[in-house]
Image (spheres, rainbow, N blue to C red):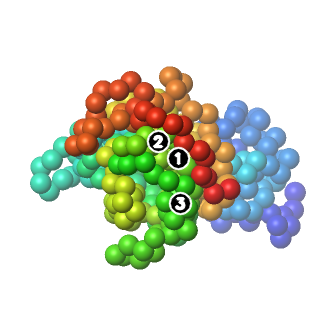
Amino acid sequence: MAYDPEVYEPRDPEGIRLQKVLANAGVASRRVCEEFIIEGRVKVNGVKVTELGTRIDPAKDSVTVNGQPIQLDASRVYLAINKPEGVVSSMNDEMGRKDLTDFVKRYDRVFNVGRLDLETTGLLLLTNDGDLAHKLAHPSFGVEKLYWAHVQGEITPQTLNKLLKGIELEDGLIAADKIRLLDAASDQSLVEIVLHSGKNRIVRRMFEAVGHPVVGLVRRSFGPIQLGSMKQGQVRELNKMEISALMKVAEGKPAKTPRPVAGKAPQRPQRATKNGRPTGSSTGRPEGKRGKDSRNR
């Protein structure tokens, strides 16, 4: 079968046959992978492949099947952790504080993708894939992170709109990508906020700037990856669908949220007292009226 200008030209004739690489990656049996190739459903480095003899280098070439990126390098590790309060987002804390190495000792040379501050809990990703980590963490790639924030005082729709339009901080203008009020009472509010910024302590600084200091903060999602029902300190490996979804958003493409991890529905963060410590409430909802959705649609 001859190649046309829109079909992948193999660079490495000594590479591994594409159908074998796909089968080893768990896409399907080698026979089914061959059918995918013949049907034009496989692309290498963005170019369609229809030749069964095509050989690739799994360490250098990128492959998609039906538009979904496939993780080929078996040495790559992709992890999610529910970071507890008081744990430093570092693999080696110079001050000797509890860090992430205590939770991932069985994995070699992984590192965290971005950071959560010491007091913040929730979803943090770790990997040894430097290229993907850079794209996920850098704000220019626009990967969104969703947080639930307990803040002091009853926040108003006007304040939410102000956060959507943007506020001036000491390091520049910053605006929420999306925001909505989940619950509100006279002394405290629960707000869901989505940002793609990676600036230090940005959620806390934004709410501080509008007069509603944060007393409890949880990251619920990072791009398409959900915290789900993970307990604090729990670590799990991402599944193939989650890895594929991460690769898509890292390239600026929309990706569906993979099926959440089985378990109980996620609990909202515990309500905090005036000194910011949890009270042990089972629901974490501030008492009082139910807030209205203020998402920017």
Q: Nearer the viewer, residue 214 or 141?
A: 214
- Kind of residue at disc 1: Leu
| Outermost residue to the front | 186
Query: First in sequence: mark 3 or mark 2?
Result: 3
Look at mark 1 in the image and give the residue it sits on. Answer: 181
**Which residue is painted at 27% across and 47% down in the image?**
119
- Kind of residue at disc 2: Ala
Q: Are marks 2 and 1 in contact (CB under 8 Å)?
A: yes
- Kind of residue at disc 3: Gln
State the quadrant of the N terminus.
bottom right
- Position in image of residue 199 (x %, y %): 38, 65
- Position in image of residue 99 (x %, y %): 23, 46
Rounded to the nearest angstrom, the CA distance separating label 2 from label 1 is 7 Å
Residue 184 numbered tag: 2
Name above or below for residue 285 compared with residue 108: above
Q: Nearer the viewer, residue 286 or 260?
A: 286
Look at mark 3 in the image and give the residue it sits on. Answer: 158
**Which residue is painted at 35% across and 26% down in the image?**
281
Q: Nearer the viewer, residue 43 or 267?
A: 267
